[in-house]
Amino acid sequence: MEVLKIADLLDDPRVDGYVVRRALSKVVAQTNSASIEVSRVEGSQGYTDFVKIVVRGVNGRSGGGGAPTIGIIGRLGGIGARPAQIGLVSDADGAIACLSVALKLLEMQARGDFLQGDVILATHVCPRAPVIPHEPVPLMGSPVDMGTMNRYEVDSAMEAILSIDTTRGNRVLNHKGTAITPTVKEGWILRPWPELLDVYEWITGEPPVILPLSMGDITPYGNGVYHINSIVQPATVTKAPVVGVAITAKTVVPGSATGANHEVDVALAARFVLEVAKKFTEGQLRFYDETEFARLVARYGPMNILQTLGKNDENAS
């Protein structure tokens, strides 16, 4: 239900971050236990509105409590490609899923169900984003660069991050529905965490589907290296563990394609994210094994260079 409401809200050439804030604020007003911030940022090809929602938990850190904070990021270039395309594009699914989870959490609070810890949700709203070349099909661009997205969407209070992104423009994963990535932390691609696989199985009723990542995928944009998409770009600017939640297809679908939003698949991703948020903020779920990660770093050294642009080509050996 929430996915349909948000998709309808965003499928409007006049929509912006302030329209989204007004819609969500109607629910916030019933509990006054959340805040919504909108920041308009101008870029070389227009503007976008970053939307950040903080849903406070009953024992959240924002109120002096000790429950952990989870971050949920809706990744995309834009929700529309007007005037080149009319309507929601495939790339909009990250924003739809993120805002649907926000709406659900706010509705839960209005009914009396509160999570233990805080949930910070961030995405951006741009109905007029550019289309950029990419193999095997074009992707959606954005009026602002990836560094700007990370500054507005990744919050230092996030102790773990779920990054939702349409991931249909590839021939690497041929599955319709949703998939998750291995955990990425400080330049390391860690193993897919069993507790997250459990939640995936419970939500989908199917065996886990894992989106494979290359080392290039976890490096920052701007280094000239191929990236499957921006799904784990938040991992380049944080120490928090990051898991990508991909909305996928059996065929290659351009991010700029309209009519390609499958609400059932978006809802699966949103439900997975919501259940992980419940368990993580209650301290019942982790994203990785801290002891194992410490052993990897002790034996092989830090991999933080993969969170940077690395060496210049002239200096590379």
Image: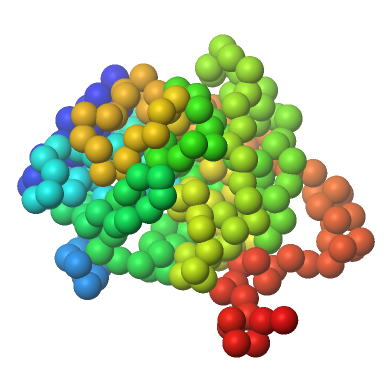
Please provide percent x and percent y for residue 92: 29, 41
Q: Is residue 255 above or below residue 46?
A: above
- Please give the name of the residue rendered at 81% of the width and 52% of the height, measured from the top-left corner: 293
Asked if residue 113 can be seen in this view, the reply is no
Q: Is residue 281 above or below residue 157?
A: above
Q: Residue furthest front?
A: 136
Colouring used for the render: rainbow
**Which of the pair 8/247 is nearer the observer?**
247
Please provide percent x and percent y for residue 143: 25, 64
Q: Please tell me in which quadrant of the rendered image residue 30 appears.
A: top left
Q: Residue furthest bottom?
A: 314
**Which of the pair 311/203 is nearer the observer?**
311
Q: Is residue 188 above or below residue 181?
A: below
- Please give the name of the residue rendered at 41% of the width and 50% of the height, measured from the top-left corner: 135
Asked if residue 222 can be seen in this view, the reply is yes
Q: Is residue 121 left or right of residue 240?
A: left
- Please give the name of the residue rendered at 70% of the width and 37% of the height, measured from the top-left corner: 192
